[in-house]
Amino acid sequence: MEPIRLLVVDIDGCLVAVEHAAYDLGNLARVAELNRSSLTDPAVPPLTILSGRPHPYVDALMQVLDIRVPAIFENGAGLAVRSPYTARYRAEVERGRVSLAVLARELGGRPELTIQPGKSASLTVFPVDPDEGIEGIERLLEEIVEREALELVLDPAQECVNVLVRGVDKGLGLRWLADELALPLSQIAGIGDSLGDLAWLELCGFSCAPANAVEAVQLRVDSVSEFEDVRAVEELYRAVIERNRRATSSLAE
């Protein structure tokens, strides 16, 4: 059993409940404290983020959680560094910007949907009425992408549909993180909740999910918490630490 040297977590559905819920600041603070303890305790892996959220949002959470290693934003399109403050995009993103602009133009003014602002290397589309679900939005996006022959792929989440440049996804994002930190994927643990997270969770040496994760994710990860969202992240973080302590003990023996 290899030690885990990095814990990677999604935001929506993991660090916070979906549907733009309020953050549980108490539990979030405990996760931040666990992350800070990685500076002095070798059994505690540092925490980072792999999310579809745009850079400013991920950057703010890096400060809240005191994340000091790089993080991934816009579903693998960009890499954020807190200090020295930098953000850069994958070269592959450039060829998809024209397609993203075409799709945004086609969607403009439609009353049944809203496009999340702030993204420059992907699109995220929400139904205006969350009770309608994302199925209608997904069908509309599929029709436009096919009709216009756009170099884009759809990545449905629990409450929205992410639209990604073909070839750029969270799996690529995890590999980017591993390369930046010179870590084998087998020494990375991940926590995710939606179908789009499987692309990177299945690359991890140890994969986890909160109780609110979709069934397909729960069936394909190594550990599922009995808790939801950030309470699950705290529990699973502690489980990873305990796993590391066991690994160290077995090596000593």
Image: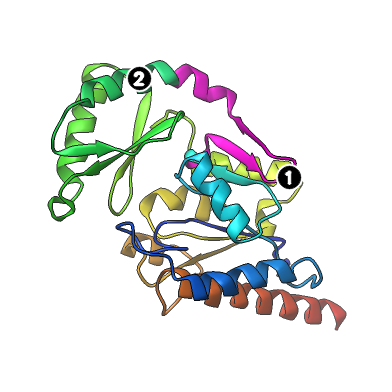
Q: Residue at x 13, y 51 (%)?
A: 132
On screen, residue 81 above or below 14: above
Closer to the eye: label 2 or 1: 1
The picture quadrant where one finds residue 187 is bottom right
The picture quadrant where one finds residue 153 is top left
Ranked by sequence position, the earlier of labels 2 and 1 is 1
**Are there few (<14), some (14-19), or many (20+) residues within 10 Å of tag 1?**
few
**What segment is highlighted magenta in the picture?**
75-96
Spot occupied by residue 86 in the image (x, y as percentages of width and height): 67, 36
Spot occupied by residue 241 in the image (x, y as percentages of width and height): 67, 75
Asked whether, in this view, residue 199 is left or right of residue 153, the answer is: right
Asked whether, in this view, residue 222 is left or right of residue 148, the answer is: right
Q: What residue type is labelled 2?
A: Ala
Q: How far apart are marks 2 and 1 (CA)?
A: 32 Å
The front one of 167 and 28 is 28
On screen, residue 170 above or below 40: above
The front one of 114 and 228 is 114
Q: What residue type is labelled 1?
A: Ser
Asked whether, in this view, residue 79 is left or right of residue 18, the answer is: right
The residue at which mark 1 appears reads as 83
Spot occupied by residue 94 in the image (x, y as percentages of width and height): 51, 19
The front one of 116 and 249 is 116
On residue 101, the disc is 2
